Structure formats: structure tokens, C-alpha cells
Image: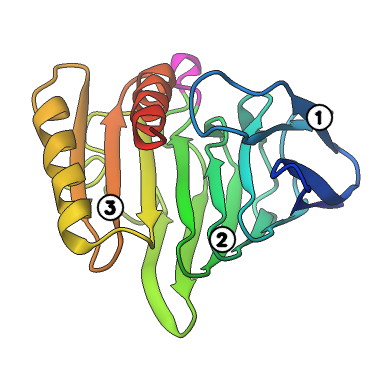
Amino acid sequence: MYSKLLISTKLTKQNATQIDDCFVSPPFKLHTLPTHREGWQNALNVIQMSSSPGILSGDELDIQISLAEKTTLSLSTQAFTRVQSMNIDAFASQNTKIYLASSSRLFYLPHPLVLHKDSAFKQKTLIEMEDNSELIYGEIVAIGRVLNGEKFEFRFFSSYLRITNGENILLSDRIQWHPNKMSLTSLSQMETFSHQGMLLYINLSLTEIEIKNIVQDLQECYNITNSFLIGISQLNEAGLMIRVLANRADVIENLFYEIAINLQK
């Protein structure tokens, strides 16, 4: 099934963010929510919903998000996304394109992606940021239904993320997991953990020193812990990346939301 989700924003005369254009095809749905007390002020809060039990063999998901100048969008999802079992020669894919106009802001942290036994999934995310825009973007991936004995039982997972500012590439990140071809439990891979999370913060209005101070503050807050393994790195320009390994999805989710709310102050 080919499924498409398109959402764009506009700024009203009262400087509020509203949906400008919206299109969804099954199983996607969109629903607006009341303004949160925490986070960015005057943000438009939207939840991305799905009537499907998960991503099925042959599915092609097309997501397009476009923010107008000075608009603010907080986009969340309804529940975990489950990549279901597939035949040996089949896979599913998702392509996401995001555009942030000048001085716009986006917070997008979908629920965890769960790779079921015999599943295969490719995703590609391209993000274009204009000057003074701000992005908080994350993803969480589970290596299978661990309690069902499906640890590393998926066929492959491929992920490509690229973020640009004009001709300048701010970030290019690739993940390739092939459990039958590589040792994903080795050092610097998943080791003994079952969930991996990535959170990005890019603010094109901040200086290198300002980003460095944020990184140092985060490192001091989360350097020592028994419930997860965390790494916090400063990007070459205008941002930082956080990677977390844990054995529970909610541990990473709660951590990322806590960090995101603090970054939005």
C-alpha cells in the first residue's frame, strides 16, 4: 500500500500557527491537540495517527512536512510503529521530507519503531533548514519483541538521515543493521541493549559557544546512570546529537521528552 501524509503550516494575523495544507491517505490520520503548557509558546500541536496494525510487506510511506516562516509545530504519534513479519524477498519503506522556513521551529519525536521477526525496513529522512530555524528531532528503534524471544530476529533495518542549510550539509547519518551478516551485540553496536534512541537539536540562531554550553550542561546532568548508556556530541555547526542505549523504550522516551522540554525554554 502507498500511503501519504502531507502537512504544512501558516502564520495567522494573531501570530498563531495553523494548518495551511493537509492531506492524508489511509491508514494515516491527523488530529490537532490543545496547546501544551510546557514547551514552545503558541506551538501548533498535532498527533499523527494510523488505523493500521503496523507497517506491512510492500508498504510505501510518504511523509511531507513544511513549516512556513515563524511558525511552530509540535508533532507526535499515536503509538508504537510495528514493522510486521514479511516474506524473504519483501520489505517496506518510508520517505520523509521536512522543510523549515526561516525562524520556524519543529519538535518531532515519533513513538518507537519495533522490528518484528523477519521484518525488513528502509527509511530515508531529508530535512532542509533555513536560517534561524530550530529543530528537535528524534527516533527510537527496538531490535524486536524481546519478551517474545525475537531479539535481532528481523532481516534488516536501513536508515539514512540528512540535514542541510542551503548548500551546507549539517548532518549525514546512516544506520545499517543486518543481524545475519554482522555482530550487533559487539562493542560500539547494541551490546547488551535492546533499544536505541537518537535525539537531534539544531538551532541555526545559536553560536558555537552557546551550543557547547548546552552540551556541557547535558553531559553534567546525564553522565552517570545505571538505566541507560548515553553519548552527547556537538555537531560541527549549530547543533548536537544524543544517542542512548537502553532495555526499555519508556526510559528513552521519558529522557528525550525531558531534554526536549528543557531545550524549548
Question: Where residue 126 sits: x, y (%)?
Answer: 56, 66
Q: Is residue 223 left or right of residue 61?
A: left
Residue 133 in the magenta stretch? The answer is no
The residue where tag 1 is placed is 31
- Picture disc at residue 240: 3
148 or 97: nearer the eye?
Answer: 97
What residue lies at 64% left-to-right and 50% top-to-bottom? 71
138 or 132: nearer the eye?
Answer: 132
Q: Is residue 184 visible?
A: no
What residue lies at 38% left-to-right and 43% top-to-bottom? 199
What residue lies at 50% left-to-right and 23% top-to-bottom? 145
Specify the amino acid type for callout 2. Answer: Thr
From this viewpoint, which residue is outermost toward the front? 14
Specify the amino acid type for callout 3. Answer: Leu
Q: Is residue 211 left or right of residue 147?
A: left
Main SS type for the magenta part?
A: helix
Q: In what element is the residue under mark 3?
A: strand
Q: Few, some or many C-alpha atoms within 10 Å of disc 3 (few <14, some 14-19, many ≥20)?
A: many
Label 3 vs 1, first from the N-terminus: 1
The answer to which image quadrant residue 43 occupies is top right
Q: Is residue 52 left or right of residue 75?
A: right
What residue lies at 48% left-to-right and 63% top-to-bottom? 160
**Position above or below: 19 against 133:** above
122 or 180: nearer the eye?
Answer: 122
Instruction: Give the mark count.
Output: 3
Residue range in magenta is 145-149
Specify the amino acid type for callout 1. Answer: His
The residue where tag 2 is placed is 125
Label 2 vs 3, first from the N-terminus: 2
Mark 1 or mark 2, which is nearer to you?
Answer: 1
Question: Where residue 19 sits: x, y (%)?
Answer: 81, 45
**Position above or below: 237 against 83:** below
